[in-house]
């Protein structure tokens, strides 16, 4: 079961923390992947970023949420 994280008097839900982690991982992936790799998939960069965000979010929820 997921529980809140306390920082001072504020409570943060795990989903918010996982979303921030997935966003940071997506931004890092965006700058690491060269353009010729993306052209190989024949998709636009924005769709690929959404795909990576969803995959990273699911990965972080699976790994850290257990």
Image: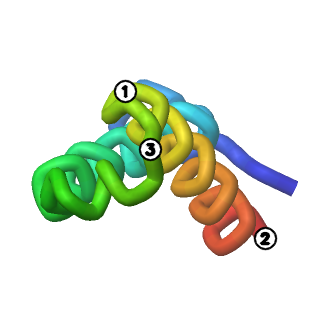
Q: Is residue 6 something that shows in the picture? A: no
Q: Secondary structure at mark 3?
A: loop
The one nearer the camera, 56 or 62, is 56
Frontmost of labels 2 and 1 is 1
- Disc 3 and disc 1 in contact, CB within 8 angstroms: no
1 w.r.t. 44: above or below: below
Q: Mark 2 — residue?
A: 66
Q: How many marks?
A: 3
**Image point 39% across, 49% down: which residue?**
21
Above or below, 38 against 45 in this view is below
Mark with earlier residue (2, 1): 1
Q: Quadrant of residue 44?
A: top left
- According to the image, label 1 marks what residue? 46
Q: CA distance from mark 2 to mark 1?
A: 30 Å
Residue 9 appears left or right of 29: right
Which residue is tagged 3? Answer: 42
| Residue at the image point whose x is 36% and y is 40% from the top | 23
Mark 3 touching mark 2, by CB under 8 A? no
What's the image's color scheme? rainbow
Q: Nearer the viewer, mark 3 or mark 2?
A: 3
Residue 50 appears in the figure: yes
Could you tell me which quadrant the C terminus lies in?
A: bottom right
């Amino acid at each position: 079961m997921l529980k809140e994280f306390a920082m001072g008097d504020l409570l943060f839900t795990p989903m918010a923390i996982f979303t921030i982690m997935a966003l940071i991982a997506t931004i890092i992936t965006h700058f690491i992947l060269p353009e010729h790799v993306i052209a190989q998939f024949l998709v636009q960069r924005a769709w690929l970023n959404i795909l990576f965000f969803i995959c990273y979010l699911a990965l972080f929820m699976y790994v850290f949420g257990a």
